[in-house]
């Protein structure tokens, strides 16, 4: 109950260290908490529980008495060339900052396909959005502004219902909007206890759906270095023209990878000291789903090969899929993924016969 997640113990985690530009490491973390509420847009109680959970663990409070102005400024986003992207009407921050001020924390859904707007309504929404964006641009430069949420709405000449409607009209999926005063529109979300211990920038979010979590993993956390994929493809194409062995090909690719990577002093320290760049509370099993003729197999040891009949083709170590095809009849209802993740295979000899146990 005294930890940063106030009684919600850690159930699972995935951590990835990334190095960028200046070379300093920053960490992407997924955590699954025990007894955390699950979002169900059709269940008002679920929505209420999620909002209560978010407000308990996440804050953007710029006037917190716990922290100095200097520490709060660490959380304040400053636009740079890395966050700017070109859009139809100019340049926009790819993190959608400044954020929208909100009277209270809300989880907003996009309008359904059945909810159509008239031309007049669309024009009104577009006008409101332009007014809001212009006002956000003005007040985002003044971190000392004392506007209330209600005064902000008066400045843009719309009521709260029209404001929420304007925000929802741009959404493609459900999104959390934190309670946020107009002077907090550039502050990244933080956890108070982690902030007091870590004393560095963070951005903490409540994940609403598994798909977003998956896409973040694939597109962002596990992204490869710029240009590296192209270099490796070129190396592979060159190797295909020759008669290199698998071992020689692997050596060429490894050298290409190592010699073409630019790393900072901090990243070099991580590698030299064998500090892990990723940590997971769950292990993974690789399943080679290539066609049989494209799968690479490992030769058995010389000792075993010497004992085989001269015309034997049984020269490769049995792989996961080979083991799966030989499972006993009582396991025929076990699928490949369950077999890979839930079963261990052990082989032992008894009375001059080899026994396989699952």
Image: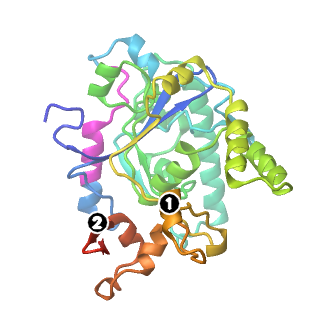
Q: Is residue 293 above or below residue 8?
A: below
Locate residue 178, reporting x and y percent: 38, 40
Query: How would you rate the neighbour count of disc 1 (Cα within 10 Å): few for under 14, some for 14-19, many for 20 or more?
Result: some
Q: Is residue 51 magenta?
A: yes
Q: Report the residue at 50% width, 36% height from top.
A: 99
Circle 1: element type: loop
Of the 4 image quadrants, the one containing the N terminus is top left
The residue range painted magenta reads 49-63
Q: Report the residue at 38% width, 22% height from top.
A: 62
Q: Is residue 20 magenta?
A: no
Circle 2: element type: loop
Predominant secondary structure, magenta span: helix
- Tell which of 111 and 262 is nearer to you: 262
Locate residue 281, reporting x and y percent: 32, 46
Of the 4 image quadrants, the one containing the C terminus is bottom left
Locate residue 120, reporting x and y percent: 65, 61
Locate residue 277, reporting x and y percent: 47, 34
Q: Is residue 269 left or right of residue 290?
A: left
Residue 85 seen in render: no
Residue picked out by circle 2: 43
Residue picked out by circle 1: 110
Residue at the extreme left of the image, as rendered: 1
Query: How would you rate the neighbour count of disc 2 (Cα within 10 Å): few for under 14, some for 14-19, many for 20 or more?
Result: few
């Amino acid at each position: 109950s005294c930890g940063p997640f106030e009684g919600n113990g850690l159930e699972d985690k995935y951590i990835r260290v990334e190095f960028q530009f200046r070379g300093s490491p920053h960490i992407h973390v997924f955590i699954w908490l025990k007894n955390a509420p699950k979002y169900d847009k059709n269940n008002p109680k679920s929505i209420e529980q999620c909002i209560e959970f978010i407000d308990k663990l996440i804050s953007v409070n710029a006037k917190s008495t716990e922290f100095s102005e200097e520490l709060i400024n660490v959380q304040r986003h400053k636009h740079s060339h890395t966050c700017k992207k070109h859009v139809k009407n100019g340049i926009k921050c790819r993190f959608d900052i400044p954020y929208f001020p909100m009277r209270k924390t809300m989880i907003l859904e996009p309008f359904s396909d059945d909810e159509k707007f008239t031309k007049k309504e669309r024009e009104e929404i577009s006008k409101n959005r332009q007014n809001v964006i212009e006002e956000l641009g003005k007040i985002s430069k003044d971190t000392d502004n004392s506007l209330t949420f209600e005064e902000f709405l008066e400045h843009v000449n719309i009521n709260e219902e029209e404001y929420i409607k304007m925000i929802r009209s741009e959404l493609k999926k459900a999104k959390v909007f934190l309670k946020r005063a107009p002077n907090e529109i550039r502050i990244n979300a933080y956890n108070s206890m982690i902030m007091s211990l870590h004393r560095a920038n963070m951005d903490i979010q409540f994940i609403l759906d598994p798909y977003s979590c998956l896409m973040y993993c694939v597109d962002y956390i596990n992204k490869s270095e710029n240009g590296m994929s192209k270099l490796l493809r070129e190396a592979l194409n060159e190797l295909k023209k020759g008669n290199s062995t698998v071992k020689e090909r692997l050596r060429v690719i490894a050298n290409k990878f190592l010699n073409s990577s630019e790393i900072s002093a901090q990243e070099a320290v991580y590698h030299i000291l064998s500090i892990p760049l990723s940590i997971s509370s769950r292990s993974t099993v690789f399943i080679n789903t290539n066609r049989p003729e494209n799968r690479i197999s490992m030769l058995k040891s010389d000792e075993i090969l010497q004992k085989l009949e001269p015309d034997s083709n049984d020269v490769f170590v049995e792989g996961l899929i080979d083991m799966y095809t030989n499972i006993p009849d009582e396991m025929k209802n076990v699928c490949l993924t369950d077999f890979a993740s839930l079963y261990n295979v052990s082989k032992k000899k008894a009375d001059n016969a080899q026994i396989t146990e699952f």
